[in-house]
Amino acid sequence: MRILSVTPISVSTEELHRRQDRYNRLCPPGINIRLMNLGDDADAPVALQTSDDVSSSEEALFARFAAEDPTGFDAFMPDCVLDPCVDVDGRDLALPVLGLLKLNAHHFAGRGLSVGAIVRNDAIGAELDRKFSSYGTGDLVGGAQVLGLSVEDISDDTKWGHAVTEHLGRMDTDVVVNGCSAVEVSLDRCRPLLVDPTALALALLSLPTTPEESSRR
């Protein structure tokens, strides 16, 4: 499966390469992701700080996916755990739009797990709560918990990890979604289990769905 992904905000060349390298490491055999920058348009947000930023990001992503040549790709996938452009009525695109959070949510629901989440700020938390609930798999327990970090902290694995550790001990769920698709957090045997939504979604996408696919693996 070849997937075209676009960042939810305008990022630097260095950050784009960091995110692409992360996908390259996480993609199982059979999954290939090409990541593109949302761009430098004046309306493109550089951080998701407010609800207006979240809405602007989704509109910019719709426009970007609509403008891209889908030839050679099987699906679009926003580089964002908030699933912008996923399951939005009346907004069809040339290819299916896969959602990191949607894949996670249905997997957790199917296993009967209670789910919490940690996020960078209030605006992201509110949208994550709304989007998770929209999938009909239940609500996040206690709502998304806010870490109070900046957009620059996304690439600071150590700072993010320390903030996460402080919050996990106060959360009583089976799993906790790390509410940023571009963050690396390695916590050994943490409780509750901290889930990398990108890694899980890609693993789920790699599962064979037909006998033919299964025989090729």
Image (tube, helix red, strand yellow):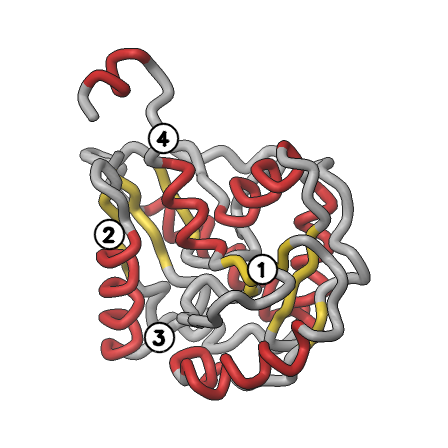
Q: In front of the other: label 2 or label 3?
A: 2
Work out whether residue 202 or residue 166 is closer to the camera in this orientation and state it: 166
Which residue was labeled with disc 3?
Answer: 11
Sequence-wise first label, 2 or 3: 3
Residue contact at pointers 2 and 4, CB within 8 angstroms: no
Residue contact at pointers 4 and 1, CB within 8 angstroms: no
Work out whether residue 1 or residue 213 is closer to the camera in this orientation and state it: 213
Sequence-wise first label, 2 or 4: 2
Residue contact at pointers 2 and 3, CB within 8 angstroms: no
Sequence-wise first label, 3 or 1: 3
* Amino acid type shown at disc 3: Val
Q: In front of the other: label 4 or label 1?
A: 1
Query: How far is the residue under mark 1 from the one under mark 2?
Result: 29 Å
Sequence-wise first label, 1 or 2: 2
Q: Residue furthest right?
A: 142
Query: How far is the residue under mark 2 from the one under mark 4?
Result: 20 Å
Work out whether residue 63 or residue 27 is closer to the camera in this orientation and state it: 27
